[in-house]
Image (spheres, rainbow, N blue to C red):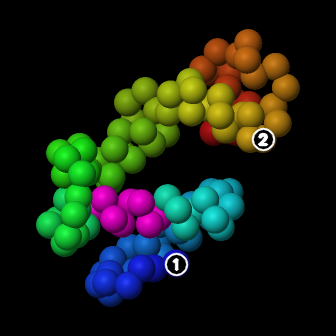
């Protein structure tokens, strides 16, 4: 749920992130947590937060990090990311699968 003190832009950003995560199969509770953390980090990076950690302000942006980890371009998702998705989907024999086999097993 959006927090007090967030601008309308940040509330829209939160809703957009939350909806996207729910569409990808995350529970509502997990989607809310990830969306809130993402928005708070972006607020810290933009100087909108009263307090922020050094990591929040110096780490790469959430959008850039998501782009690096997306399944398009580059090496795509890591084997560990694919393994965790296979685990969530209950794929049998996943521990012995290669990255390519895991990609096929999770349907991407």
Circle 2: is it few (<14), some (14-19), or many (20+) Cα within 10 Å?
few
Quote the CA–CA distance across marks 1 and 2.
27 Å
Q: Return the residue at label 1.
A: 1
Per the picture, the main secondary structure of the magenta-coloured stretch is helix
Q: Hey, which residue is sitting farthest left in the picture?
A: 47
Instruction: Say whether residue 72 is visible.
Output: no
24 left or right, relative to 5? right
The location of residue 83, given as percent across then percent down, is 65, 28
Q: Which image quadrant for residue 10?
A: bottom left
Mark 1 / mark 2, whichever is N-terminal: 1
**Which segment did they paint magenta?**
35-42
Q: Are discs 1 and 2 less than 8 Å apart at CB?
A: no
Q: Nearer the viewer, residue 99 or 50?
A: 50
Question: In the figure, 18 relative to 9: above or below?
Answer: above
**Magenta stretch: residue 37 in it?**
yes
107 left or right, relative to 80? right
Residue for point 81% across, 31% down: 91
**Magenta stretch: residue 54 in it?**
no
Circle 1: is it few (<14), some (14-19), or many (20+) Cα within 10 Å?
few
Question: In the figure, 83 relative to 63: above or below?
Answer: above
Q: Nearer the viewer, residue 53 or 14?
A: 53
Q: Return the residue at label 2.
A: 89
Residue for point 52% across, 78% down: 1
Residue for point 57% across, 33% down: 81
Residue depth check, mark 1 versus mark 2: number of the one nearer the observer: 1
Residue for point 14% across, 66% down: 47
Q: Hey, which residue is sitting farthest front in the picture?
A: 51
Q: Which image quadrant for residue 58?
A: top left
Quadrant showing the C terminus = top right
User: Dot 2: what SS?
Assistant: helix
The location of residue 50, given as percent across then percent down, is 20, 70
């Amino acid at each position: 749920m959006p927090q007090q003190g967030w601008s309308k832009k940040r509330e829209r950003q939160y809703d957009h992130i939350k909806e996207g995560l729910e569409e990808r199969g995350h529970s509502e509770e997990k989607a809310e947590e990830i969306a809130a953390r993402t928005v708070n980090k972006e607020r810290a990076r933009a100087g909108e937060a009263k307090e922020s950690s050094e990591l929040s302000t110096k780490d790469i942006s959430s959008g850039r990090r998501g782009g690096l980890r997306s399944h398009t371009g580059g090496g795509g998702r890591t084997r560990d990311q694919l393994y965790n998705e296979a685990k969530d989907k209950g794929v049998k024999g996943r521990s012995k699968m290669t990255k390519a086999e895991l990609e096929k097993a999770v349907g991407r």
